[in-house]
Amino acid sequence: MIAELIAVGTEIVSGQALDTNSRRLAEELGRLGIRVKYHTSIGDDLEDNVDAFGTASRRVDLVVVTGGLGPTQDDLTRQVLANVAGVGLVHHEPSLEAIRALFARRNRVMTDRNRVQALFPEGAEPLPNRIGTAPGIWMRIARAWFAALPGVPYEMEAMFAEQVAPRLRAEGLATRVIVHRKINLFGKGEAEVESLALDLTARGRKPEVGITVSDATISFRVAGEGADEAEALASISETLDTIRSRFADIYVGEGDVDIADAAAASLIAQGKTLATAESCTGGMIASRLTSIPGISAAYLGGLVTYSNDAKSRLVDVPAELIETRGAVSPETAAAMAEGVRDRFGADYGLAVTGIAGPGGGTPEKPVGLVYIGLAGPRGTSTSNLELGPEQPRDVIQRRTTKHALNRLRLELAAGS
């Protein structure tokens, strides 16, 4: 079984809205053993939609469409399905009554335009929508089954679970289970990691292994298939163990666990506390940490010491040190880390100072130069990053945040 997801809406193709429905549907279909091969986004144009739906009907077994089921003139999905199937639209009274009832429950007046939502391609099966006005559509065209769902995410999710998934099982389309696992690494580049894993990422290998990168975090994505979840997981267990072993020195975690999550988990597990002083990242480290549930057990607080004066007044960096060594220097990073550690009475003090750009760089200290200071029970250490003057400011800030938290994570691992 292979599937195609079609997201309808000019707001999607124009970049005004993000298509989150397709990602969610791909995950849900994978759990049913249906592999998504194509993602299509298309604007509100009848001819373009007919062409896209027609192509999908010939190349996959299942098409799930989101959007285009509303009452306005640019909601075209029902007409598109009718055109592709070569049939007319017919009125479905039970659907109209359900729409009327929903308006009544909400004490709202139903307009005549909402009547169009009770029109369905001849031969199609209406899919009830218990939480919205737009019924879905279930029908067969050429090779493919089509499931048309509303674009509103919470309506789409409820209707997929309640209406589509049971039909897929009843039609014998959901007979296998596909599982996905992700292992996250940090500390080497994508090309270097793949060069050490060519046997794992070879085309045609089973299980399938892919590599992705996000803000310098490298992720192996492994997909397995089986008659049930246990069999699917068994098919990838050896591969997962190989990755964990081969890349143990840069292994961070799995699934959604990234650098901050791993560092926070280590702090909490060891009963240690942390305080931060940030210059070029402007509070990004603190923001990332405080987004993690339970971090209050370990994170005492942080200071944005952006100016030289703030570095001196808030974390006691000597003014003469800044004058002689510079605000962006290993000595200042070390003093910031020690100062914030003392100020909060924390086990660890973590500090960053650098040049995020786009201006402010010099030949000696270019944009992208960052120093990380870490003060803790084993003393104070510094490290530097050269992220490159060509990188945008936000990229330098995000990567600095990750590298600083990774430095803490490694120190916690060494000290445990």
Image (cartoon, grey):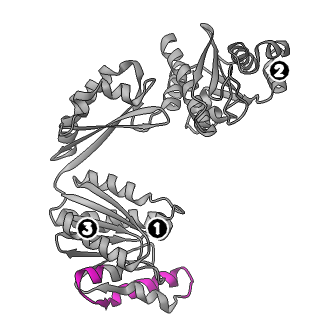
Sequence-wise first label, 2 or 1:
1
Give, as a three-letter code, the residue at label 1: Val
Residue 389 on the magenta segment: no
Measured in 3D between alpha carbons, the distance from the residue under mark 2 to the one under mark 3, in whole angstroms, is: 64 Å
Q: Residue furthest front?
A: 363
The answer to whether one can see residue 265 in this image is yes
The answer to whether residue 331 is above or below residue 274 is above
Task: Determine crowd level at label 2: few under 14, some 14-19, many 20+ residues with C-alpha closer than 10 A.
Answer: some
Secondary structure of the residue carrying numbered label 3:
helix
Residue wearing tag 3: 56
Counting from the top left corner in percent of width and height, residue 77 is at: 37, 77
Give the number of the disc on residue 116. none
Measured in 3D between alpha carbons, the distance from the residue under mark 1 to the one under mark 3, in whole angstroms, is: 22 Å
Residue wearing tag 2: 312
Q: Which is nearer the eye, 75 or 53?
A: 53
The answer to whether residue 406 is above or below residue 69 is above
Counting from the top left corner in percent of width and height, residue 212 is at: 38, 38
